[in-house]
Amino acid sequence: MGETSLRIVTEGGPRAALRLLELLNDGGEEGAWRLEPEGASGDGRFTLTLPAGAADPAAPRRAGAALARYVLEAAEPGLLKELARTEHGVEDDAEADQLCAFAARRLAASAALRAGYLADAFAGYLERELSLHLEGFIRFRLGPVKEELREALRAAVRERLPERQFEQFTALLRVLLEHRESRVPAVHVFHSGGQAFRLYDGSMRPLVFSPGPDEREGGPADGEEAREESRIVSCLLSAAPRRIYIYTEEPESRVIRSLVGIFGDRAAVYSGRLP
């Protein structure tokens, strides 16, 4: 490529520019790439330059690999959040973080393929044009990669939906509980695994309540497990105990999570061997 320099412009701010500089100088001549701010406005625009004397024929390929690493490491998380907001209407930061975490786990399986595609795309462009605007390139020339991010996010939304419905359901029941008068001071719940439960009052007498008409509805799921969960929840909502003691060897099971989600600080979970 003769005595021609390479040039990369980024508007990602100083942290992004410094990370790019670190990646670009990794595996090549130490310190060959130079970083300079553009203008004096402090708008976060930086130029990274590989001088002509250091730009050997393999330089675009090395730069392409470095830029691919940067996209996977720094750009993809931001792109996922942007897509969550613009294409799925997710404005809550916590919800967006959860969706993006789901999507990132799915994307991890194809990271090597994306890295190869990105490296080739960046290297080919630099070989032809010698100068590249990073954010513009990502926005307008990486359609297949962005489509893969979109699909991962769609899958995350589908995967997250039942959990979100579960959270909404428990929140609704928590509000219902707050307006109930407590009928017993305490309830002991013995969970033997699966859907096997025994309920006792504070004096360790068997506890049985018939749910009212508004308590017969199940949760967002169907089936035998959901019906049994609904029965236990309905009984406990009828009792509205001030304290609920849960003994279980499966503290992470769905029904136990439901009870803790509904009763909050009223619930105490004891895991291990049942008494």
Image (cartoon, helix red, strand yellow):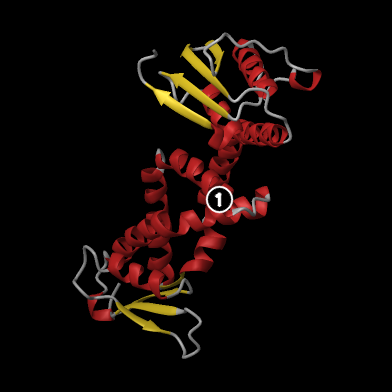
Q: Spot the residue most to the right.
A: 213
* Number of residues whose C-alpha sits closer than 10 Å to that of mark 1, classed few (under 14), some (14–19) or many (20 or more): few
Label 1 is placed on what type of residue? Ala
Q: Which residue is mark 1?
A: 94
Asked whether, in this view, residue 201 is left or right of residue 123, the answer is right
Picture coordinates of residue 173, whole percent (x, y): 68, 31
Q: Taking 231 as reference, is 38 above or below it?
A: below
Residue 272: which quarter of the image? top left
3 or 211, which is in the foreground? 211
Count the marks: 1
Residue drawn at point x = 62 percent, y = 53 percent: 92
> Is residue 159 in sight in this rendering?
no
- For the point 55% across and 50% down, the residue is 94
Q: Position of residue 100 (x, y in %)?
A: 52, 47
Nearer to the camera, 81 or 97: 97
Residue 219 position by quadrant:
top right
* Above or below, 239 relative to 13: above
Q: What residue occupies the far front of the structure in this picture?
A: 203
